[in-house]
Image: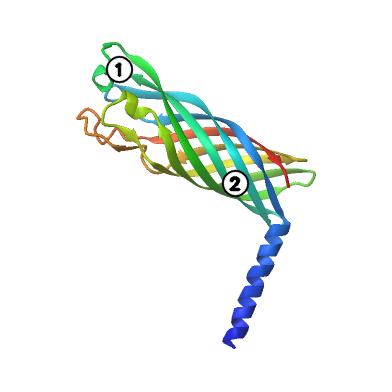
Amino acid sequence: MKNLKKLIVIAIMASTSLSLAAQATFGIMGGLNMSKFNISKTDGLDYEFGPGFDAGLFFRFRAGNHFYIQPDVLYSIKTTDMVIDNPTLFISNSNQAEVITHKMHSIDVPVHIGIVFGKAINFRIFAGPRFGFAVNDNLNTYITDLKSSNYAIAAQTGIGIDFLFLSVDFLYDYTLNKGFTSYSNAILTSSLNPHIGTFKLQLGLKLL
């Protein structure tokens, strides 16, 4: 009896995997983003939106006629403009406000769960988590005793459209963990620990 139950479970899992594989889509993806640290203008530091881009692969698995799961693997570059009014935060001899570009490189793995509707043209609504792993960051070059987080856990939501072999997504990404990990400068208090908000426009090319 136990063996029969195991065989039934294996058969269900195998049939589900085959069904998803039969409805799988694979392709390359790239796009533009606009990022900004969400922070009040305090302690002489403020952020403004800056441009960046993403590039990588997407894998979409249809589950039935109206649902899908889509994990992506992307190399992402995000930039934000830092407006520094307090020169004591800046490694410089200047006493004037300066604007520098904070650039962040990461490997991002979003996983979207979505709803599909339409026939010749598919419209999609989706949401899901994103896991990011820092590759390079230039923040500590400019501000002493301060660096960005080595990882990111974010939430994403957006809309998409598919036509023929093209896929277009517009989404918003918001990090759930705080953006800074360590600092000892007394000016940089615990209140100065923002989250990152990013708008993305992505174009996918289906290869399968």
Does residue 199 appear to the left or right of 163 in the view shown? Answer: left
Q: Secondary structure at mark 1?
A: loop
Judged from this view, the residue extending furthest toward the right is 120
Q: How does the figure colour the protein chain or chains?
A: rainbow
Amino acid type for the residue under numbered disc 2: Phe
Give me the residue at 66% from left, 45% from top. Answer: 124
Seen in the image, is 129 located left or right of residue 194?
right
SS for tag 2?
strand
Amino acid under disc 1: Asp
Label 2: which residue?
126
Q: x, y percentage for residue 76?
A: 52, 35
Q: Which residue was labeled with disc 1?
A: 85
The residue at the far left in this view is 186
Residue reaching furthest to the bottom: 1
Q: Earlier in the sequence, mark 2 or mark 1?
A: 1
Q: Position of residue 13 (x, y in %)?
A: 63, 69
Disc 1 residue crowd, few under 14, some 14–19, many 20+, Cα 10 Å: some
The circle on residue 2 is: none
Quarter holding residue 85: top left
Residue located 44% across and 43% down the image: 133
Picture quarter with the N terminus: bottom right
* Mark 2 crowd level (few <14, some 14–19, many ≥20, 10 Å Cα): many
Q: How many numbered markers are drawn?
A: 2
- Vertical placement of residue 17 versus 134, above or below: below
